[in-house]
Image: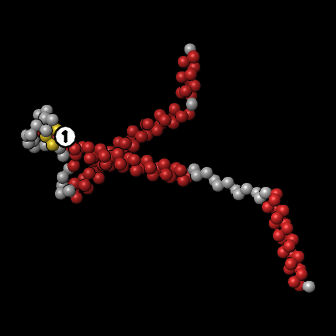
Amino acid sequence: MAVVKEFKAFIARGNVLDLAVAVVIGAAFGRIVTAMVDGLIMPLTGVFTGGVDLSHLYVALDGQDYESLAAAQEASAPVLAYGAFIQSVVDFLLVAFVIFLVVRAYNRMNKPEEAAPAAPSEEVLLLREIRDSLARRDSGAGNA
C-alpha cells in the first residue's frame, strides 16, 4: 500500500499535470507546424527548386526506375525517401525555433526584479559625514 500512497503523492504534484498539458499542447502544435510546412513552406521551396516537391524525392535501391515514390513503395522496392527526411528536418527546425521564441518571451516576462542596492555600511555613512563636515568647514573658511 505504500507504493499506492507514493503514487498518489506523485500524481498530486503540480509538475505532473503541467507535463501532461505540455505534451497535449505540444502534439497539437506539432500538427499545426506540419500543416504549415506541408501547405506553405514546401510548396514555396518547390517554386525555388523548379517545381520539385521535396517530400517525393527518393532513390530506389534496387536500381530500377519508378514513376513516383508511391509506385516504388507499391512495388515493395527498397527506397531512401530523403525528401521526407528533409521535410521532417524543416518541421523540427520550425518547432524548435517557435519553442525558442516562446521560452525567450516567457523568460523576459518573468525576469526577476533587480534588487534594490544595499544600504551603505556604517563606515561609509560615517565617512560621508566627515567629508560633508570638512566641505562645510572649507567653504566657510573661504568666506571669512
Location of residue 92 in the rendering, given as x and y in whole percent from the top left corner:
35, 45
Q: Is residue 60 visible?
A: yes
- When asked about the image quadrant of residue 45, the answer is bottom left
Name the colour scheme.
Answer: secondary structure
Question: Depth check: 22 or 79 in front?
Answer: 79
Q: Is residue 35 visible?
A: no
Q: Outermost residue, right direction?
A: 144
Q: Outermost residue, bottom direction?
A: 144
Question: Depth check: 135 or 116 in front?
Answer: 135
Q: Which residue is mark 1?
A: 80
Kindly identify the residue that appears in the image at 84 percent across and 71 percent down.
132
Kindly identify the residue that appears in the image at 43 percent across and 40 percent down.
25
Q: Answer above or below: position of 98 versus 62.
A: below
Task: Say whether residue 29 is left or right of residue 48.
Answer: right
Location of residue 8 in the rendering, given as x and y in whole percent from the top left corner:
56, 23
Q: Answer above or below: position of 67 versus 143.
A: above
Kindly identify the residue that appears in the image at 81 percent across and 66 percent down.
128
